[in-house]
Image (cartoon, rainbow, N blue to C red):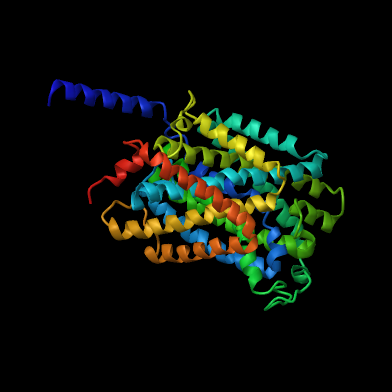
Amino acid sequence: MKESELSVDVGALQQDAEYFAKRQLKKGAVGWLLLVGLGVSYVISGDFAGWNFGLAQGGWGGLFIATVIVAFMYLCMSFVMSEMSTMLPTAGGGYSFARVAFGPFGGYLTGTAILIEYAIAPAAIAVFIGSYCESLFGIGGWAVYLICYLVFMGIHLKGAGEALKIMFGITAVACIALVVFIVAMLPHFDSARLFDIPVSSHAGASSFLPFGYMGIWAAVPYAIWFFLAVEGVPLAAEEAKDPVRSLPRGLIGSMLILASFALLILFLGAGAAGSNALKNSGAPLVDALIAVYGQHTWLASFVNFVGLAGLVASFFSIIYAYSRQIFALSRAGYLPKNLSLTNENKAPYWAIIIPGIIGFLLSLTGEGDLLILMAVFGATISYVLMMLSHIKLRLSRPELPRPYKTPGGMWTSCIALILAAVTVVAGLMVNPKVWLLAALIYVGFILYYLLYSRHHLVKGTPEQEFAMIDD
């Protein structure tokens, strides 16, 4: 090799080293117990608000059937994601899996769908936090949304280990509030109250399905709110201790906890207070307690106050999720590269701040239920692509090391794929305008890739290196 060629190669290596040195996350900051807490915290806000809008769409029976189907889909997905995350433990999560399976464009499609989910979900949660604060303190609206974003983005800028430990404590407090609610509702459960929504004239309508068979479909996006974002646990892979063991524990453990809470709240909340009373509530657990125990009881005040911890936990942890997704996409050149720069605490600061500003502006709409639908659009598209990635990798790369193997193999991912495709259609049925608005945002991301970022991808990322391993 000529000396000039050697100097160019050395210079390129130095540039690569400098590029990645500015984009480092803190290794070994998260153990398996924190990962379980992370998975629960992503989702726990869905137990406090949002799920009940499914009662207005499908009645109790429709929401119950939708919840069982969705819970089974997420359990299958957790098994599948556990396998892929131990194969490729990087901060990209689902984007990384699709990048290896389907190349740069497939990775980008998956990563941006996940980003739509994670960037919009905190805005919906901020709206629900405002409702709880209005009920508790008489103050809500934009001031509460702004405080949430400023405070919790600031904590995340201090680094992952510190942020996730705080999140774990907040989540534990929120779980206590849910247990108190469940125990308080249990003596007042009456199955007749589950079916107190007036029966409509839709096909198949009954007291169990007051909006007919189609109500089951319409309730699916709100059943998803019980579990939305639990699949984000693998985003902590580069910061996890022993990811081969801790990631499956985190995913499956958190999913089992969430499924238990979802079913208990669905039965006891509606069964004690009545489905009709909760179907449009911004703070359903508080309103359920008031309906049963009366106004100004200590139970309602306690669950209202501590319930804020559940909403805050999800808000707090999904900031972590969107920042890691943007970090991985930006580091690879799919999004502007400056978004992956990290500070002295190894926190990707622009990836935390920029989506936070966008989320705050979205929260000003005050339309929590519609923001849920937009977040669900991104989530369900990503689920389809991630399950396809598992099937593709099983077929095309069977020799790759799989420290954890999905029970049922491709049968499990095929079941999750079919159910995920159903959820995509369900979102369109509930509100076509909101679904199409989310689709337009997605199209905008796709055009950005086709016109610009595909020409500026970065070599040497973990996802690319893994994809280049010889068969």
For the image, the number of numbered tags is: 0
| Left or right of residue 71, residue 456 in this image | left
Q: Nearer the viewer, residue 422 or 130?
A: 422
Foreground residue, 428 or 400? 428
Residue 226 seen by the camera: no
Q: Residue furthest front?
A: 451
| Residue 321 shown left or right of residue 299 in the figure | left
Quadrant (top left, top right, bottom left, bottom right) of the N terminus: top left
Identify which residue is drawn at 71% across, 44% down.
365
* Residue 52 x %, y %: 70, 58
| Residue 156 image offset from top left, x and y in percent | 56, 32
Which residue is at 15% across, 21% downward?
3
Q: Residue at x 48, y 56 (%)?
A: 383
> From the viewer's perspective, is 253 left or right of 277?
left
Please provide percent x and percent y for residue 370.
67, 53
Asked if 447 appears above or below 460 in the picture, the reply is below
The furthest residue to the right: 295
Residue 305 position by quadrant: top right
Q: Does residue 110 lie above or below 164 as drawn?
A: below
Residue at point 83% right, 40% down? 138
Q: Position of residue 279 (x, y in %)?
A: 75, 60
Residue 464 in sight here: yes
**Above or below — where is 198 with respect to 118?**
below
Q: Is residue 113 left or right of residue 127?
A: left
